[in-house]
Amino acid sequence: NELLPLIVPHSRKAHPWARKGGVVFHRGKYGIDRILTIKGFSLGLGLLNRDITILLPQSYDDPVRKDHRYPVLYAHDGQNLFFPQDNEWNKSWDMIGAVDKLVSSGGPEIIVVGIHNTAQRMQDYAPEDSMVYQEDEEGRIIDREFYHGHGDLYLDGIVNNLIPFINNPTIMYQFHSC
């Protein structure tokens, strides 16, 4: 594994860094270089690799705030957070709007890290040996499925691999525009 995974944009317009190390940022109405995706990030522990989408604060590129430490919000189902085209029902949870509203109401600027799910979503989110029930409109159980969950491994992967990656100022500083 390389230290810095491949990072790609939604707009597919290459950032100048694309030729200098595979770093490319999203562009568009949400602000230049504010959103990026790490493709195939490894949480380790035998879990499937997954994409990670990161929303950076508006002031992230401000040289005066270069050493500022931002609070970080980690969110599951990251493919639903920002762009409608990233999920199967073509809608987003408008995390960009929510964060902008937070900041405009006096809240802190934050970094949002969206952890995309995989084909093993239920196992990732479920504790070991879980039973998942599906109910009809009246609350009657119509289906149940047993999962040998590995939620403990998923959380360990976030705590031991993803959070240190995001907290590493040497790596995150590379995401500043050049």
Image (tube, rainbow, N blue to C red):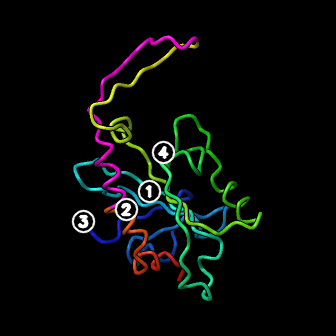
Residue 27 occupies which quadrant of the picture? Answer: bottom right
Q: Any mark on residue 162, and which?
A: 2
| Element carrying mark 2 | helix
Q: Residue furthest bottom?
A: 64
Tag 4 near tag 2, CB within 8 Å: no
Q: Any mark on residue 1, and which?
A: 3
Picture layout, residue 32 above or below residue 46: below
Which three-letter amino acid code belongs to the residue tagged 2?
Answer: Leu
Residue stretch in magenta: 138-159
- Residue depth check, mark 4 versus mark 3: number of the one nearer the observer: 4
Residue at the image position 56 percent from the left and 81 percent from the top: 68
Q: Quadrant of the N terminus?
A: bottom left
Q: CA distance from mark 4 to mark 2?
A: 15 Å
Marked residue nearer the N-terminal end (4 or 2):
4
The residue at which mark 1 appears reads as 52
Left or right placement of residue 69 versus residue 143 in this view: right
| Element carrying mark 4 | loop
Picture layout, residue 64 above or below residue 114: below
Q: Nearer the viewer, residue 173 or 89?
A: 173
Is 153 a magenta residue? yes
Q: Residues within 10 Å of mark 4 (few under 14, many from 20)?
A: some
Which three-letter amino acid code belongs to the residue tagged 4?
Answer: Asp
Can residue 72 be seen here? The reply is yes
